[in-house]
Structures are given as C-alpha cells and as structure tokens.
C-alpha cells in the first residue's frame, strides 16, 4: 500500500526565519506513541558563510521539555548525520536525520561560529512515524520550559 499520508505526522519545529548568526533551538518533537522520528532542517542561502563563519547542527534529546534537560544525542542513536555548513556549496539544502534513541523528546540546536553570517533563512520540521495507532495524528510541538 502506498499510503504514507495516514502513517506519518509532520510538525513545524521552527518556522522559517532569518537566523543570521544567533544560536537557536527548535521546539521539541514529542515521540510518545511513535516508534520513529526524523527531523529535517531547511537551510537557505547563508550570506557570509565560509571556513571561519559556519553553522553547526546538533540533535538533542530529553525526558521532558525543560531546556536544562536537553542533552546531545549519541551517534549510535542517529541515522545519518548533519553536515557543517561552512561554504556556499553546502547551503540551500535540506539536511535530514533519524532518531533511534529511547527519549520522549527531540529537538535541533543550531550554533554559529564567527559573526560573518549576516543573513540566512532556516526552518525545521519534525516527522513521526510507526505510530502505535493509525491513522496518525501529529503531536503538537512543545516549546522548552
């Protein structure tokens, strides 16, 4: 059966916006009731990106939605990998990774090195799948508390 629509849920974790060179974190993706999660980061053209001014992405996990409870996800719990965006050849892309860990919540953190990136629209979506009940109803994204 080709019905993917009823088997996944998609959430906006961070609306597309100009992030310039300010560090950011997305809302949390709640994985309760699902066996799988993917995050997709939509990176537009970054003005000023180079080897000294770049964006690093990381996946974080937590048992709750407190900012203090966020920890980096171990490489063993990630399918795929984020790539450092350190040239114009690496922007204007979508980077997606899967989560296989056991925590309830995941989110993406973006960190800039240098202050030369003066513009760059970035948005993030979270996708859940392999639901315990179908059809899937996407959970709402939760802001850090």
Image (tube, rainbow, N blue to C red):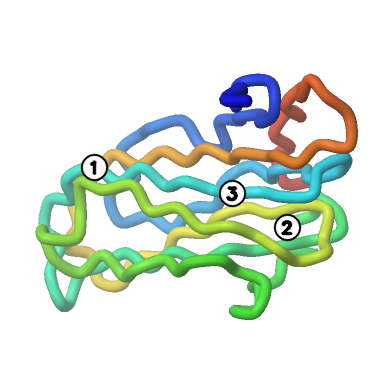
Q: In this figure, which residue is indicated by the disc labeled 3?
A: 38
Q: Which mark is residue 86?
A: none
Q: Is residue 102 left or right of residue 121?
A: right
Q: In this figure, which residue is indicated by the disc labeled 2?
A: 67
* Residue 108 visible in the current orientation: yes
Foreground residue, 133 or 108?
133
Foreground residue, 123 or 53?
123
Q: Nearer the viewer, mark 3 or mark 1?
A: 3
Q: Rounded to the nearest whole Å, what is the CA distance between mark 2 and mark 3?
A: 20 Å
Q: Which mark is residue 44?
A: 1
Residue at 63 percent across and 25 percent down: it is: 1
Q: Rounded to the nearest whole Å, what is the CA distance between mark 3 and mark 1?
A: 20 Å
Q: Which is nearer the N-term, disc 3 or disc 1?
A: 3
Q: How crowded is the residue under tag 2: few (<14 C-alpha within 10 Å), some, or many (20+)?
A: few
Residue at 72 percent across and 46 percent down: it is: 144
Q: Are marks 3 and 1 in contact (CB under 8 Å)?
A: no
Q: Quadrant of residue 131?
A: top right
| 18 relative to 52, above or below | above
Residue at 66 percent across and 49 percent down: it is: 37
Q: Position of residue 23 (x, y in %)?
A: 44, 58
Q: Position of residue 34 (x, y in %)?
A: 81, 43
Q: How crowded is the residue under tag 3: few (<14 C-alpha within 10 Å), some, or many (20+)?
A: some
């Amino acid at each position: 059966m080709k019905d993917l629509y009823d088997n996944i849920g998609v959430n906006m974790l961070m609306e597309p916006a100009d992030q310039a060179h300010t560090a950011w974190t997305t809302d949390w993706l709640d994985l309760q009731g699902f066996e799988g999660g993917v995050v997709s980061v939509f990176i537009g053209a970054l003005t000023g990106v180079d080897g000294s001014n770049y964006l690093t992405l990381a996946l974080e996990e937590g048992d709750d939605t407190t900012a203090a409870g966020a920890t980096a996800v171990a490489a063993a719990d990630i399918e795929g990998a984020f790539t450092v965006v350190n040239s114009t050849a690496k922007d204007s892309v979508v980077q997606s990774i899967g989560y296989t860990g056991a925590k309830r919540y995941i989110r993406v953190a973006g960190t800039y090195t240098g202050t030369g990136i003066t513009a760059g629209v970035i948005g993030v979506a979270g996708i859940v799948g392999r639901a315990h009940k179908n059809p899937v109803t996407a959970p709402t994204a939760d802001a850090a508390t």
